[in-house]
């Protein structure tokens, strides 16, 4: 016989933090388009004498921080899916069904949005540009793309999303395990930043590409949490488990 359990009320969301900071960051990135900061940062990692970007042929950056790290996050996502499926079958996991569902949805959306957006925006990678030994012409994010036979596929940053998608863990844990949630937030931000810098060193992305990715991943995970898990005190109702 199932017993009614009251799901704990969520801690209040501060819109000035959850939405304000991403909004300010987005505005700053749009202003950044009027500067040469992206290009200047990319030049720090470019060495014509070495044949291009200093990390382009790095085994550690490509095989470990890119390929293996991505595989680890994919494996984590698979375990999350298996856990969500098991929550329908195992009594021990049923109380966490919504959290696991929210985790799966967040991970899926925060990674799957990247490829179609890349195709639509057609932004070139630094390593493809004339300034860095390539053949393509640079254009700002909101500018028309120069004619080319090889449209870019570099905005937003795919590998950065591999790390920033773990923002999902923060939201899934914030009501039940606040301290662990804060640790998950630090982990997601740290991994996303490391992956971002590693791809900048390889010439795959500009700085702004990765910051935009962090904003998108944060908003996707926030939205999933708000519509699936967020429960103000006035809405805390019994559920059967």
Image: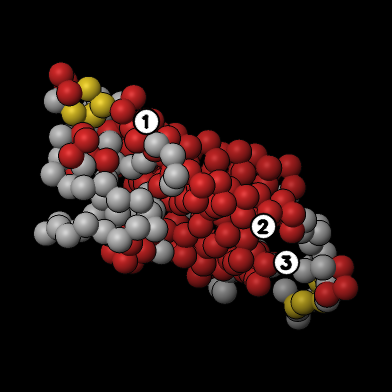
Q: What kind of element bears circle 3?
A: loop
* Residue 158 image point, x, y percent: 36, 51
The residue nearer to you, when weighing 214 against 10, is 214
The residue carrying mark 3 is 230
Q: Nearer the viewer, residue 201 or 29?
A: 29
Residue tagged by mark 1?
40
52 relative to 119 in the view: left or right:
left
Q: Is residue 132 visible?
A: yes
Q: Residues within 10 Å of mark 2 (few under 14, many from 20)?
A: some
Neighbourhood count class around disc 1 (C-alpha, 10 Å): few under 14, some 14–19, many 20 upward: few
Q: Is residue 215 left or right of residue 153?
A: right
Q: Which residue is mark 2?
A: 19
Single out the mark in the foreground, 3 or 1: 1
Residue at 68% over, 54% down: 20
Report if residue 83 is visible in the image.
no
Mark 2 vs 1: CB contact within 8 A:
no
Residue under the image location 44 percent in, 56 percent down: 77
Residue 208 location in percent, x, y? 44, 44
Judge the density around disc 3: few (<14), some (14-19), many (≥20) Cα neighbours within 10 Å. many
Q: Residue furthest top?
A: 49
Q: Residue at x 74, y 54 (%)?
A: 16
- Residue ID at (33%, 32%): 42
């Amino acid at each position: 016989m199932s017993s009614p359990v009251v799901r704990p009320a969520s801690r209040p969301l501060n819109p000035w933090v959850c939405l304000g900071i991403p909004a300010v960051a987005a505005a700053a990135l749009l202003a950044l388009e009027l500067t040469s900061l992206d290009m200047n940062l990319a030049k720090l990692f470019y060495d014509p004498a070495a044949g291009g970007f200093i990390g382009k042929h790095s085994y550690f950056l490509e095989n470990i921080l890119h390929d293996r790290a991505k595989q680890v996050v994919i494996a984590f996502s698979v375990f999350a899916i298996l856990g969500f499926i098991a929550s329908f079958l195992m009594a021990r996991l049923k109380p966490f069904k919504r959290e696991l569902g929210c985790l799966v949805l967040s991970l899926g959306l925060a990674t799957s949005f990247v490829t179609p957006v890349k195709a639509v925006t057609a932004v070139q990678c630094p390593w493809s540009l004339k300034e860095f030994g390539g053949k393509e012409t640079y254009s700002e994010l909101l500018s028309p793309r120069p004619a080319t036979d090889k449209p870019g596929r570099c905005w937003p940053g795919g590998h950065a999303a591999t790390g920033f998608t773990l923002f999902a863990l923060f939201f899934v844990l914030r009501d039940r395990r606040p301290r662990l949630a804060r640790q998950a937030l630090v982990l997601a931000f740290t991994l996303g930043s490391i992956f971002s810098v590693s791809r900048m060193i390889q010439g795959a992305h500009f700085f702004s590409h990765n910051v935009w990715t962090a904003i998108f991943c944060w908003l996707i995970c926030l939205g999933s949490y708000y519509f699936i898990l967020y429960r103000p005190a006035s809405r805390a109702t019994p559920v059967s488990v």
